[in-house]
Each structure stands twice: as C-alpha cells, then as structure tokens.
Amino acid sequence: MEANLKSVDEVMNQKFGKVGSPERENFRREAYSYCMGQIIHDARKQEKVTQEELAKRIGASKSYISRIEKGLIEPGVSTFYRIIEALGLRIEIVKPVV
C-alpha cells in the first residue's frame, strides 16, 4: 500500500477511536441518528407530508420531528413505528443473506 493511502478502518480509528471505545460508540450513535433522520425526512417528502402534519399524526410537536430529521435525537422504537405507520409505510424484518 502506498504511504499516503490509508484503509477506512485506519482513518476511522484515528478520527473516532478504535471499535468499542467511547469515542467510536458516540460516533456510531450520531451516524445512526443522522441516517434514521434522513430516512424519515426522505419518506415524509416522498409522501408529500409536512413536518407539522406528521407531528399531528403521531401526537408530537413539529420541532420534535425536525430534531429527528436533523439527527439531533433518535426516536424510540415505538415512536419510529408510529412515524412509519403515519407515512403509510411498513417495516420488513428479514434475515440477511450471508
């Protein structure tokens, strides 16, 4: 490997700590929250639903939906399911092909 090339693992370890470290776990949680927020945002936009309408459908505030979509907070499982149902979607749990 060339001296200026690094593996993804090496970069992640340097920037966010080794797997299992508090720093790496914090990064993982933040990345997960961000991705979940983007999924909800994209689904909401596709269904042409406003944040305010989605909030009303699940009994929450518009600012709560906004914070979820920005990845600032991670909704609990029951809230996530309510959001998915409110958008007319469903979750399918499947065993991955290995």
Image: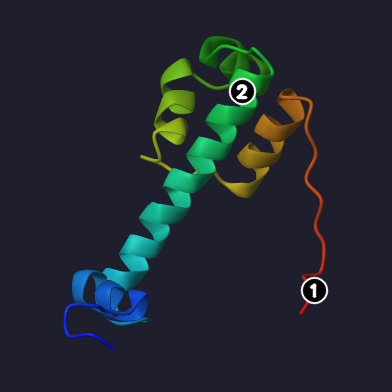
Q: Position of residue 35 (x, y in %)?
A: 49, 46
Q: Amino acid at mark 2?
A: Arg
Residue 22 makes an appearance in the image: no
Please rate how many residues cluster around mark 1, counting C-alpha atoms within 10 Å: few if below 14, some from 14 to 19, many from 20.
few
- The structure residue drawn at horizontal position 81% and vertical position 69%, both measured from the top left corner, is 95
- The structure residue drawn at horizontal position 26% and vertical position 74%, both measured from the top left corner, is 11
Which residue is label 1 attached to?
A: 97
Q: Which mark is on residue 71?
A: none
Residue 60 makes an appearance in the image: yes
Q: Position of residue 39 (x, y in %)?
A: 57, 38
Marks 1 and 2, how far apart at CA? 29 Å
- Does residue 81 sit above or below 24 in this rendering? above
Q: Quadrant of the C terminus?
A: bottom right
Is tag 1's residue or tag 2's residue first in the polypeptide sequence? 2
Instruction: Farthest residue to the bottom: give it.
Output: 1
Please rate how many residues cluster around mark 2, counting C-alpha atoms within 10 Å: few if below 14, some from 14 to 19, many from 20.
many
Q: Position of residue 51 (x, y in %)?
A: 53, 16
- 1 and 2 marks in contact (CB < 8 Å): no
Which residue is label 2 attached to?
A: 44
Q: Quadrant of the N terminus?
A: bottom left
Q: Label 1: state its secondary structure.
A: loop
Name the residue nearer the viewer: 4 or 90: 4
Instruction: Farthest residue to the front: give it.
Output: 2
The label nearer to you, 1 versus 2, is 1
Q: Quadrant of residue 12?
A: bottom left
- The structure residue drawn at horizontal position 49% and vertical position 38%, both measured from the top left corner, is 37
